[in-house]
Amino acid sequence: MESVSAIVQDTPGPRREPTQKRSRERVERMLAVASALIAEKGSDALRMGEVAEKAGVSIGSLYQFFPDKSAIIRALADRYQKESEACIAEALASVKDRKGLEKAFSELVDTYYGIFLGEPVMRDIWSGTQADKALRELELAHSRANAGMLLAVLLRLHPDEDPASLETSAFLIWQLGEATMRLAVSVDRAEGDRLVTAYKRMALGELARD
Amino acid sequence: MESVSAIVQDTPGPRREPTQKRSRERVERMLAVASALIAEKGSDALRMGEVAEKAGVSIGSLYQFFPDKSAIIRALADRYQKESEACIAEALASVKDRKGLEKAFSELVDTYYGIFLGEPVMRDIWSGTQADKALRELELAHSRANAGMLLAVLLRLHPDEDPASLETSAFLIWQLGEATMRLAVSVDRAEGDRLVTAYKRMALGELARD
DNA sequence: CACAAACGTGAGCAATCCTCGCGTTTGCAA
DNA sequence: TTGCAAACGCGAGGATTGCTCACGTTTGTG
């Protein structure tokens, strides 16, 4: 938690935190504009000058709250991560046995796939196209956090299994799930659906391993 | 094959093909310098001016043979792909039955992992950090070609299986293998080894599906 | 030897990220 | 109310870097 927020905001140096109501609204506008521009043209084509102009602020104001371009993207990524965490927690909350885990996992994958298909910004940010070290580290931190929720269930269901082995399984299953999502949304819909189905089969096989 | 070479060289517009011996040697120097710089500082930090300077050529000469920065990286990627293809073909050549496939696949994964660990340039290029559309397409084309070799074996071993389903399996297994490699080399060695082992288990499970 | 095509050059253009010095507004305590 | 420090806001311009282009040089060929 601590380290994640550090990656989100503080990499090149601290920036002013908006304390007044006026500037908080301005920051919201900046993020909204950035999100719209990424949805439209992709994060590679995001231009700081355009964000400032469309948000009705100066370039200087933009840099008062975001230390660099990547910080805007990381801030957006962090919002999506909060939604993801809630979504995963809800899906896994009521799991009581292996059968329940399989059902919950399968539905979670479908939900995630739907989110990936429907959220162009999230898709763009996590499309593995980021030449940005801080963003890669943030993604890894998010992924570990998400895998951790899966691990918690596995530890509960398999208390006599080697915890380190379960952790590796959970982490890999989660990472490969994200890789599958990225791949599935980059090919046509029919192939994407088949890939997600095949992934679920592979992941469930690993989850069923005793 | 046709489309791959198109992605490698011709995206922003054709450039001169080196016909004289002298210029071929110069192009080799440019690629060697670029490779060394990527190994040292990563492809994000590759500077065209530095490549030209260290190769002892002018910036203009560099752009006569590579239409843009990404073309240099794609040219290097293409060389590694040729090695990969040979490596995969050799590993899968003598597969006669399912048992043989499992052994060959397992060894192939180990070999690939070793290559990833030992080749900083290849690791960097395929680290999923490329904000470069042409390079992403090239990676997909390479991956489909490699998955195709695995598919050929599967079709041979399972002639009565649905070919479309086998193709999806082969493609996903290959893509997730590459994802696992990228992940494994980005964490510490011990965790990387565990992840590769877990991946092999998952992939072999999918390969054994009848 | 003439000449066309390939080769080689580097100053400089254009795009873009980000800084910095300075003016303005806000909240608050006296 | 008023004085003031801190927060806010601004945008010209510094710095970097990918890439172009007009021109000079070398090479192969009839």
Image: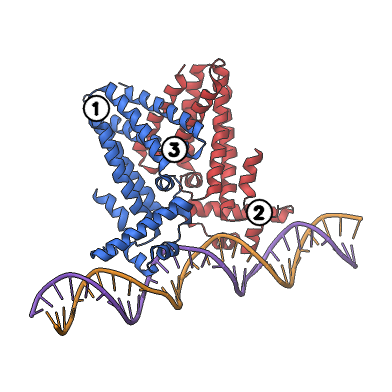
Chain colours: A blue, B red, C purple, D orange
Q: Earlier in the sequence, mark 3 or mark 2?
A: 2
Identify the mark at residue B179; answer none if there is no mark: 3
How many numbered marks, from 0 up? 3
Task: Name the foreground residue: A67 vs A3.
Answer: A67
Tell me the crowding category of disc 1: few under 14, some 14 to 19, or many 20 or more residues within 10 angstroms, Cα based. some
What SS does tag 1 mark?
loop
Tags 3 and 2 on a common chain: yes
Under mark 2, the amino acid is Gly
Label 1 – label 2 distance at C-alpha: 56 Å
What SS does tag 2 mark?
loop
Quarter holding the C terminus of chain A is: top left
Q: Is residue B54 left or right of residue B15?
A: left
Quadrant of residue B154 in the image?
A: top right
Under mark 3, the amino acid is Ala
The residue that disc 1 covers is A95
- Subunit bearing disc 2: B
- In the image, what residue occupies the spot 56% across and 47% down? B134
Q: Is residue B34 left or right of residue A86?
A: right
Identify the mark at residue B13; answer none if there is no mark: 2
